[in-house]
Amino acid sequence: MRAKRESHHLHWLAPRAFRTLQRLSVLLLLCGGIACDSDRFAVSGIEPTVADYRTQSQVKIIGQGFKPEVGYSVYFGKAKAQDVAYMDANTLVARPPTVTEPGTADVTVVSDLGPGFLVRGGFKFVDLSGNPVEHM
């Protein structure tokens, strides 16, 4: 009778060990792909934070962890920036889209690998037809 219990106990452990190995495999697979901290980046600032809403002046996205082999998309509000370029591990350059009216926009940077970073109210589209110093 004792032998049957041990057999039953071992039979119960085998599927549990298999599930643990499956979970570890998935974790390792993800770590080799998009879920590792090494694929994460951060945005610490935008320069400049203000531009005329009718023009497409160049904007620097300042941060850390940008990689040349990864593509990035930058959104100002819901509008996608044009000409996003990698400069170095701390800088991306983008041209904000033209918009129809002045306003404040969230800036979202999204990696082709999946992670994204949001800067709430990070950019202002203003009317610079008058005195530009008033909008700084």
Image (tube, rainbow, N blue to C red):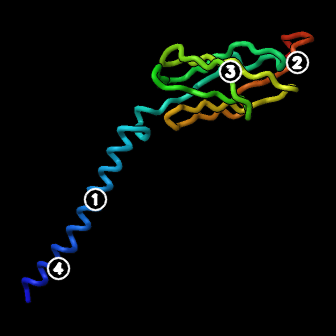
Give the Cα separation between the discs numbered 1 and 2. Answer: 59 Å
Residue at the spot of label 3: 82
* Residue located at (72% from left, 21% from top): 96
Between discs 3 and 4, the one toward the N terminus: 4
How many marks are shown on the rendered structure?
4
Quadrant for residue 99, please give it: top right
Residue at the limit of the structure toward the right, as seen here: 130
Mark whose residue sits in front, 3 or 4: 3
What label sits on residue 8 in the rendered view? 4
Q: Indicate the amino acid at tag 4.
A: His
Quadrant for residue 30, please give it: top left
Q: Indicate the amino acid at tag 1.
A: Thr
Residue at the spot of label 1: 20
Residue at the spot of label 2: 127
Q: Quadrant of the C terminus?
A: top right
Q: Indicate the amino acid at tag 3.
A: Gln
* Residue located at (69% from left, 24% from top): 81
* Residue located at (80% from left, 15% from top): 55
Name the spot of residue 122 as percent of width and height, x first. 70, 28
Q: Indicate the amino acid at tag 2.
A: Asp
Between discs 1 and 4, the one toward the N terminus: 4
Give the Cα separation between the discs numbered 3 and 4. Answer: 63 Å
Q: Is residue 73 above or below residue 58?
A: below
Q: Secondary structure at mark 3?
A: strand
Q: Secondary structure at mark 1?
A: helix
Give the Cα separation between the discs numbered 4 and 2. Answer: 77 Å
Between discs 4 and 2, the one toward the N terminus: 4
Mark whose residue sits in front, 1 or 3: 3
